[in-house]
Amino acid sequence: MNENDKQIVGEKAAEFVKDGMVVGLGTGSTVLYTIKRLGQLVQEGLNIKGIPTSIQTEKLAKEVGIQLVNFSKIEQIDIAIDGADEINPNFELIKGGGGALLREKIIAKAAKTFIVVADPTKMVERLGKFRLPVEVIPFGMEMTMKHIKAIGLSPELRLNGATPFITDNGNYIFDCSIPNHIQTEIIERELNLIPGVVENGLFVGMTDLVITLDKNGDVEILSK
Ligand SMILES: O=C[C@H](O)[C@H](O)[C@H](O)COP(=O)(O)O
């Protein structure tokens, strides 16, 4: 993981944002560079409205001068840009390392174009080395954990020191190892059928473009 790589791919994504767009602003250390670059472009006259995927991103967007818009007041998001924890060759993602997966998924789904910015370490042949984050309601979480185990995953409650990590939505995260004999879309669907599961960090069939670096360190824009 190289900070410079993150900066290159993050800043590149800002070139896809055009005047007048409503922009979904992702969360994490890579898209941070997109947001900072967009802030510079706004100072130079770019007119955009942002919708943040987390409280952390909301704070950053305000700091760099991006105007935010209330999600309930807009019809559609033109473009959403976000990072990922893993990306496979089918453009399926694991997200949620920072715990922002729920709002990120709502915003990615609402976006006409969803762009992922990722340094090359995120590109994998098979998803699952990074454990899949699953957001769960605190009530009855022991029972929810049992149901998740029953579909073949191994969940562990994410901690923040000695207490559970709490998402922006007031929920907990289970980080789950996933068996590689079950297809991602089946895991995604089955998880979300369990009462108590709010959402999971598998993003299947959502990504339009991936901005990364090739072996020579040059920007590579991958599309399906
Ligand atoms: O909850 C966090 C998000 O899903 C991030 O997009 C993901 O964890 C990647 O973050 P980073 O760019 O810091 O690796």
Image (spheres, rainbow, N blue to C red):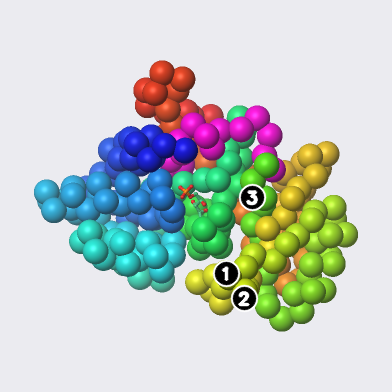
Q: Can residue 91 be seen in this view?
A: no
- Does 118 appear in magenta? yes
Label 1 element class: strand
Q: What stretch is highlighted in magenta?
A: 112-128
Q: Can residue 169 be seen in this view?
A: yes
Closer to us: mark 3 or mark 2? Answer: 2
What is the x, y in percent for residue 131? 67, 50
Res 102 quadrant in image: bottom right
Q: Residue furthest right?
A: 150
Residue at the spot of label 2: 163
Q: Is 209 situated above or below 185?
A: above
Q: Does the residue labelled 1 lie within 8 Å of ligand 1?
A: no
| Alpha-carbon span between mark 3 and mark 2 | 25 Å
Of residues 180 and 44, the one nearer the viewer is: 180
| Alpha-carbon span between mark 1 and mark 3 | 22 Å
Residues marked 1 and 2 touching at CB (< 8 Å): yes
Of residues 126 and 161, the one nearer the viewer is: 161
